[in-house]
Amino acid sequence: MHLQKLMAERGLTDQKLAEAVGVHPGTIASWRLGRNFPRGPQLMAICQALKCSLDELVGVAKPARHPAVRMAKKLFAEVTMGGALDSQALHAIASGFHRMSGGKITRMEVLFRRMAEVVYEVELLSRCESSPLEVYRQLQLFDEKQE
């Protein structure tokens, strides 16, 4: 936990932080020295007093964004334009990954194609008033169309 560092950066003493959190200054010292650790509500009160995030307080680094995640978000925004995510949008995102990889099949492309298949099945089932056999036939037609 980065309590001592954050307190020093903000010029807070054990006494001042204890008053803000509603605990004894000795409790703050114990947390600061790592002998004990605050519980949930106390953690939130410390974050508010220090004006920091819980991640910052406990020292969790922000995960690095993989380029594929950034690209998926960009493609999603372009394809859906703020609309609903449907099987066609997922296929368009997969195609975008395919184009950007120079025509090579990537894991992200495969992932989005599989997601599109599942979403398509759900779309069919949600609007289907016919028998399961009819749904199966529609899925076969979809698979043939995708190949």
Image (tube, rainbow, N blue to C red):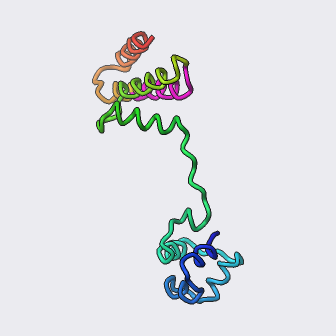
The image quadrant where one finds the C terminus is: top left
Left or right: 135 in relation to 7: left
Q: Position of residue 9 (x, y in %)?
A: 57, 75
What is the magenta segment's predominant secondary structure? helix
Q: Which residues are magenta?
A: 105-119
Q: Residue 27: x percent and y percent?
A: 63, 85
The residue sitting at 54% across, 44% down in the picture is 65
Q: Nearer the viewer, residue 25 or 2?
A: 2
- Total numbered labels: 0
The x, y position of residue 125, in whole percent, is 35, 27
Residue 2 in the magenta stretch? The answer is no
Q: Position of residue 81 (x, y in %)?
A: 30, 35
In this rendering, position of residue 139 left or right of residue 45: left
Picture residue at 64% right of the left edge, 76% below the top: 4
- Residue 73 in the image: above or below residue 64: above
Q: Is residue 46 above or below residue 138?
A: below
Where, by quadrant of the figure, is residue 104 drawn? top right
Q: Residue at x 34, y 16 (%)?
A: 134
The residue depicted at 52 percent of the width and 24 percent of the height is: 110
Say which quadrant the N terminus sits in: bottom right
Q: Is residue 109 magenta?
A: yes
Q: Is residue 12 above or below residue 132?
A: below
Residue in the foreground of this view, choosing between 119 and 8: 8
Q: Quadrant of residue 128?
A: top left
